[in-house]
Image: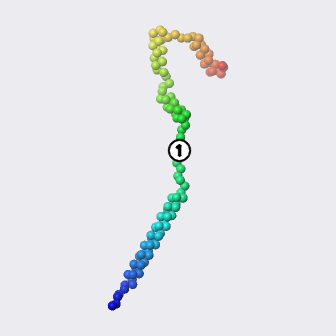
């Protein structure tokens, strides 16, 4: 019994198997290298800002002040009604004192 062996086919199959193993080894090495690169990277830091409770209160006060007109409309209406009814009395001593205080502050005299 004679058996014919195709040498070309055997060599080609062996070469393909070896090439596949080499490719697998290269892929494994690349994966290991990528994993090491990820491990060796410094952790990314995120910047953050935190406000103290005083700063938060200040911000709320600013928002409230900017949203208000600065005029107490209720008080204005009460004074207007008192004037129209003749019930508004001017305290002349207090008025004079405040005028003097204002002028003193305006001209730098206390």
**Relative to 2, residue 104 above or below:** above
**Relative to 53, residue 22 above or below:** below
**Relative to 57, residue 50 above or below:** below
Residue furthest out toward the right: 109
**Residue sitting at 35 percent across and 87 percent down?**
4
Identify residue for label 1: 48
**Residue sitting at 37 percent across and 84 percent down?**
6
- Residue 49 place in picture, x, y as percent: 53, 42
Residue furthest out toward the top: 86
- Colouring chosen for the image of the structure: rainbow
Characterize the local packing of mark 1: few (<14), some (14-19) or many (20 or more) Cα atoms within 10 angstroms. Answer: few
> In the picture provided, is 70 more to the left or to the right than 98?
left
- Residue 44 place in picture, x, y as percent: 52, 52
- Residue 72 place in picture, x, y as percent: 48, 21
Circle 1 sits in a helix, a strand or a loop, which is it?
Answer: loop
Q: Quadrant of the C terminus?
A: top right
- Residue 24 place in picture, x, y as percent: 44, 70
Foreground residue, 107 or 21?
A: 21
> In the picture provided, is 9 more to the left or to the right than 100?
left
**Residue sitting at 52 percent across and 48 percent down?**
46
């Amino acid at each position: 019994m004679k058996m014919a062996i195709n040498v070309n086919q055997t060599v080609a199959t062996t070469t393909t198997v070896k090439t596949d193993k080499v490719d697998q080894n290269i892929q494994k090495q690349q994966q290991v290298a990528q994993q090491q690169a990820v491990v060796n990277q410094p952790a990314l830091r995120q910047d953050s800002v935190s406000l103290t409770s005083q700063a938060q209160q200040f911000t709320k006060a600013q928002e409230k002040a900017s949203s208000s007109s600065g005029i107490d409309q209720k008080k204005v209406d009460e004074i207007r009604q008192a004037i129209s009814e003749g019930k508004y009395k001017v305290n002349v001593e207090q008025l004079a004192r405040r005028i003097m205080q204002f002028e003193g502050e305006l001209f730098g005299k206390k």
